[in-house]
Amino acid sequence: MLKAWKWYQHCLSSHPVKTQIVSSGTLWGIGDIGAQYITHSTATSLLPKSQNEGAEFKINWKRVAITSMFGFGFVGPVGHFWYEGLDRFIRLRFLLQPKSPRFVATKVAADGIIFGPFDLFVFFTYMGFSTGKNVAQVKEDVKRDFLPALILEGGVWPIFQVVNFRYVPVRYQLLYVNVFCLIDSAFLSWIEQQKDAPWKQWFTSFQPLKERGGEV
């Protein structure tokens, strides 16, 4: 484990962007496998015992590859420049002392307001188009999945980021985020695989009446 950590440190120092791209793609792929297993286990638990015995879990490798490409193509490179740039911008623009409460709070707020929603929008849009859906279908998927994911993530992710921005050196903040992206990717993949699950309809109740056809 120590050798692996030293090797990672060397890769991060020599090739920071490439290292983050590879690690992000790998972790997002693993996260999708986890999401598939959770979805499979949930579905089989609702089946009669006679049918449950023959329900073998099989990995959808095409979906794993699609999700990994999101990590390779978006999370890795964009995440690298976002966290590096955010730290630099907050320090130089607002002249705040690094690690101070105001510094951490500003970074958490910026990350949650700007990068968080953007990341979710890109993820659900990408997953829709990558599976062959048209523009109208992708819009419906985003409308269905975006708000539930944003609300559920918004209650947890800021806590992780407070720890990240307060205690983790800037050099390793990307690694910290990537580790939790393993959980995050599983969560987002699970959200996307739930399709029109009944629990998602609860979130649509907050939409304006005009968007719901004027229902009272």
Image: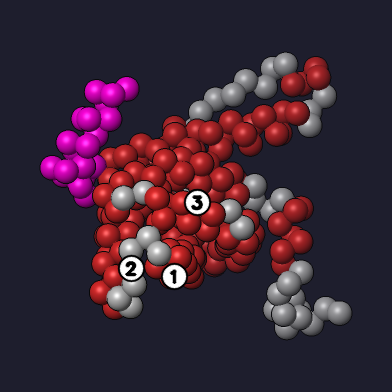
Measured as percent of width and height from the top left, residue 26 is found at 36, 37
Question: What amino acid is labelled 3 in the image?
Answer: Phe
Which image quarter holds the C terminus?
A: bottom right
The image's mark for residue 160 is 3
Could you say whether the residue bearing mark 1 is in a helix, strand or loop? helix
First in residue order: circle 3 vs circle 1 = 1
Could you say whether the residue bearing mark 2 is in a helix, strand or loop? loop
Q: In the picture, residue 8 is in which quadrant?
A: top left
The image's mark for residue 71 is none
First in residue order: circle 1 vs circle 2 = 2
Seen as rendered, the residue at the extreme left is 14
Label 3: few (<14), some or many (≥20) within 10 Å? Answer: few
Label 1: few (<14), some or many (≥20) within 10 Å? Answer: few
**Could you say which is closer to the camera, residue 176 or residue 79?**
176
Measured as percent of width and height from the top left, residue 70 is found at 38, 49
Q: Which region of the structure is painted magenta?
A: 1-19
Q: In the picture, residue 57 is in which quadrant?
A: top right
Image depth: mark 2 or mark 3 in front: 2
The image's mark for residue 102 is 1
**Could you say which is closer to the camera, residue 170 or residue 30?**
170
